[in-house]
Image (cartoon, helix red, strand yellow):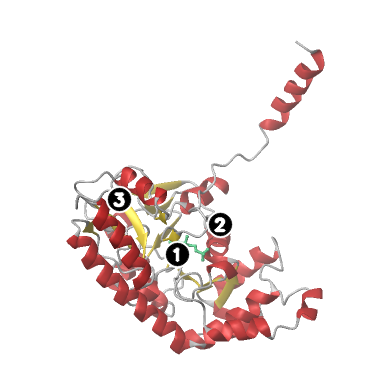
Amino acid sequence: MDRSLRVEDKIMKAFEKNIRKVEPYVPGEQPQSKVIKLNTNENPYPPSPKVAKALEEMDTDRFRLYPDPSCGPLVEALAEFYHVDPEQVFVGVGSDDVLSMCFLTFFNSDKPILFPDITYSFYKVWAELYRIPYECQKLDEDFRIVKEDYYKENGGVIFPNPNAPTAIYEDLDDVEDIIRANQDVIVIVDEAYVDFAGRSALELIGRYDNLIVVQTFSKARSMAGMRIGYAISNPMLIKYLNDAKYSFNSYTMNQAALVCGVEAVKDKAYFEESVRKIIETREWAKGRLEELGFCCLDSSANFIFARHPEYDAKELFEVLKENGIYVRYWGSERIEQYLRITVGTREVMETLFEFLNRYMGKGECL
Ligand code: PMP
């Protein structure tokens, strides 16, 4: 063998041990061709027309300058919307950025952080990335969080409510019990989908100084592509978050996102109407799925988690994809027979049901 190659091999081995190796999160596919896209829980409606107007009128000369590192107007708009002080609001590049910053800032114990075994798969990735010990708590057989599992010693707690990918919403009283039982650590409630559900844990912020609520513009406000997320908590925890952010990247939010974000928050009527339409379509779609023989979990989000007793989920996922209909499938333990289907417009859902009707034994297989 060539000697120089062997030397190179040796060098590789020397530095390899110092490389931070991670198994990354796998995001849902973003096909660039036109497909029926029900795989990443985006909102099927456009953002508020006020966002389009703001973009049209945007002063691009501002792009020469760095954006406001404190994201002032957006923080203020959110504070006004949620009736909190601006010191209680932190914004980031999607809630993924906010959650990642929370892991970095608040989960620094030797004790394991706790989160459900079936949940947003990014939690495990951040824990590994930041070398935070973690312990997954099993959801019960109905995919519900067992709150008592979170009453033991730990280094912090995080869970989504509604959970993903199950779409199940836990009652705020149960969420409060978990927060109350964990006042020596930080509890993060990831409310990416709460607008389609029930009461938010935001109403508990004043009562528990260990609570952080994280939400996003990606779902109910139709702005996944703009990447805006936020955390609301007490001023002390928000200051710690900002200190970590300014030690990482001062200019997280770009100028266009800052301007559009403000317009989206201000248009409350549009936001509420969009949420209403999605909930209505979700309930109707759930009924249609059940008519087709699917078993659906009780959804409080903008997606439905369903299985069919007679059809293998992986096969169904693949045949849907071959026919230009993208849904999400994981194939992981306990959920290998489930598909996660984002709620689209009624017309888009009709296309899905037309296909399923034909495919599912009505003798007209494609
Ligand atoms: N939390 C949960 C539970 C999610 O499903 C998602 C969407 N993938 C996020 C957070 C992140 O959303 P975003 O970064 O778009 O705000």
Secondary structure category for the residue under label 2 = loop
Instruction: Check disc 3 and report its element: helix, strand or loop.
Output: loop
Please name the residue that numbered disc 3 is placed on.
338
> Does the residue at mark 3 contact the one at mark 1 (Cβ under 8 Å)?
no
- Tell me the amino acid under the disc marked 3: Tyr
User: Is label 1 in a helix, a strand or a loop?
Assistant: strand
> What is the distance, in whole Å, between disc 3 and disc 1 at their CAs?
27 Å
In percent of width and height, residue 250 lies at 71, 67
Left or right placement of residue 289 versus residue 252 in this view: left
Residue 65 in sight here: no
Q: Residues within 10 Å of mark 3 (few under 14, many from 20)?
A: many
Front residue of this view, candidates 278 and 71: 278
The one of 88 and 71 positioned closer to us in this rendering: 71
Amino acid type at circle 1 is Ile
Q: Earlier in the sequence, mark 3 or mark 1?
A: 1
Q: Quadrant of residue 345?
A: bottom left
- Comparing labels 3 and 2, the label whose residue is closer to the camera: 2
Q: Residue at x 42, y 59 (%)?
A: 158
* Residue linked to disc 2: 32
Q: Which disc is residue 188 wearing? A: 1
Q: Does residue 273 appear left or right of residue 24 in this picture?
A: left
* Distance (Cα) linking label 2 and label 1: 34 Å
Tell whether circle 1 marks a residue whose Cβ is less than 8 angstroms from ligand 1.
no
- Above or below residue 312? Residue 40 is below
Disc 2 residue type?
Answer: Gln
Q: Position of residue 130 (x, y in %)?
A: 57, 49
